[in-house]
Image (tube, helix red, strand yellow):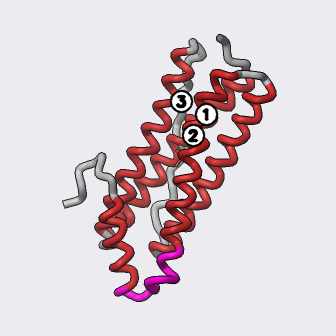
Amino acid sequence: MKLSPKMKKALNDQVILEASASNNYLAMASWCEVTGYQGAANYFYAQSDEERTHMLKIVHFLNVLGAVATIPAVKAPTSSYTSLEELIKTALKNEQSVTKAIHNMVEIAQKEKDHSTYAFLEWFVNEQIQEETKFETLLQKFDLLGRDNLGINEIDKFLASEATASTTPVA
Ligand code: FEO
């Protein structure tokens, strides 16, 4: 099967989005690490790795179909945040943009009756539901546990427990 030029472009654009997401989470992790949020740092380092695997999925999909993925340059991410809450709000906003882009690709696949890409994208559709829910739930914790040092410390501990360490945890 052959990808349409439109679908190919959309998938390559998604490679950029996933690479940017990986880079953004890396910058977030680094900010958390130097700010003293150890749990959050571990969490976002792992999240950065996860985004890289999303990017690779699309790169392989393109290459297997002979469409040849374009490996993009990635813009420098924001490197400083005013608070952990602001950082997580930014993460949620970014995920919402990614969801929109995925849904847009699903619509292209539907219109073009491109069943292979449609099936490939199903995993991403489900993943985005989880990603958005994850950050929405995290944001609720600021209301539930508070924004003072004790509350933030609890949230950081929660993030530590959630960090599915595909990376070496921060020492
Ligand atoms: Fe790959 Fe978090 O979207």
Kind of residue at badge 3:
Ile
- Residue at image x 50%, y 50%? 76
Q: Which residue is mark 3?
A: 58
Q: Secondary structure at mark 2?
A: helix
Between 72 and 164, which is closer to the camera in this rendering? 164
Q: Nearer the viewer, mark 3 or mark 1?
A: 1
Q: Quadrant of residue 25?
A: bottom left
Distance between mark 2 and mark 1 Cα atoms: 5 Å
Q: Which residue is mark 1?
A: 121
Q: Position of residue 26 (x, y in %)?
A: 40, 53
Q: Position of residue 105 (x, y in %)?
A: 70, 35
Q: The N terminus is located in which quarter?
A: top right
Q: Is mark 2 within 8 Å of ligand 1?
A: yes
The answer to which of marks 2 and 3 sits earlier in the sequence is 3
Kind of residue at badge 2:
Phe
Between 67 and 2, which is closer to the camera in this rendering? 2
Q: Which residues are magenta?
A: 140-150
9 vs 170, left or right, is right
Is residue 168 among what the camera can see?
yes
Q: Secondary structure at mark 1?
A: helix
168 vs 111, left or right, is left
Q: Secondary structure at mark 3?
A: helix
Mark 2 near mark 1, Cβ–Cβ under 8 Å? Answer: yes
Q: Which residue is mark 2?
A: 124
Q: Which mark is residue 9?
A: none
Q: Is mark 1 within 8 Å of ligand 1?
A: no
Mark 3 near mark 1, Cβ–Cβ under 8 Å? Answer: no
